[in-house]
Image (cartoon, rainbow, N blue to C red):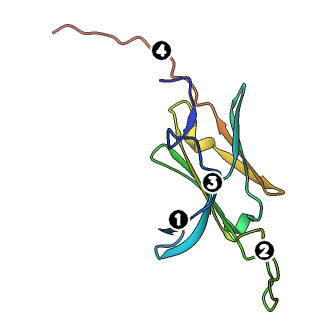
Amino acid sequence: MTNELTRPQSDQPPDQSEHTSIYATPSGPSPVERHVFTPPIDIFETPTGLVLRADLPGVSLDTLELQVQNNRLTLFGRVAPAAPDGSRLLHQEYHEGDYLRSFILSDNVDHESITAKLTNGVLEVFLPHAPEAEARRIQVSGS
């Protein structure tokens, strides 16, 4: 067991730039070509667990998925088109695309008690410490 409760899936520092990728989204099987962004995150520890904060501008509750599977926390957020239907885009600096980031969780995180909230484009995920197993005496019998 390590002191480190979460770590990015890759050992390389995250690339803050965007790239285009073809992949199947967590909620659908059909591959789509989309811009993929790596959201900046902060992780800090409190006495009761870890808090992960991610900036996800343009993501709403309806376009955000957070899941834990096989000791991995995956964050997926979709940014919808900025221009309303029927309008003509004259200048664009905000791109539509997807935020995608994964973290490997250690055994020190209680996976069943993870909670999250999205406020003004900032996702905050609370990863509570797992209760430590109590030591117990094992009775040994003879043959």
State which quadrant residue 85 falls in: bottom right
Name the residue that disc number 1 marks.
26
Name the residue that disc number 2 marks.
92
Measure the C-alpha gap from mark 4 to mark 3.
Answer: 42 Å
Q: Are marks 1 and 2 in contact (CB under 8 Å)?
A: no
Name the residue that disc number 3 marks.
38
Q: Amino acid at mark 2?
A: Gln
Q: Earlier in the sequence, mark 1 or mark 2?
A: 1
Of badges 4 and 1, the one in the foreground is 1
Q: Amino acid at mark 1?
A: Pro
Of badges 4 and 2, the one in the foreground is 2
Q: For the residue labelled by badge 1, is the local secondary structure a helix, a strand or a loop?
A: loop
Residue most extreme to the left: 143
Residue 69, given in percent of the width and then of the height, sits at 48, 50
Going by the image, does 36 lie left or right of 85?
left
Q: Amino acid at mark 3?
A: Thr
Q: Earlier in the sequence, mark 4 or mark 3?
A: 3
Measure the C-alpha gap from mark 1 to mark 3.
Answer: 16 Å
Q: Earlier in the sequence, mark 4 or mark 2?
A: 2
Q: For the residue labelled by badge 3, is the local secondary structure a helix, a strand or a loop?
A: loop
Quarter that holds the C terminus: top left
Of badges 4 and 3, the one in the foreground is 3
Of badges 1 and 2, the one in the foreground is 2
Measure the C-alpha gap from mark 4 to mark 1.
Answer: 40 Å
Name the residue that disc number 4 marks.
135
Q: For the residue labelled by badge 2, is the local secondary structure a helix, a strand or a loop?
A: loop
In the image, what residue occupies the spot 48% across and 68% down? 23
Q: Amino acid at mark 4?
A: Ala
Measure the C-alpha gap from mark 3 to mark 2.
Answer: 19 Å
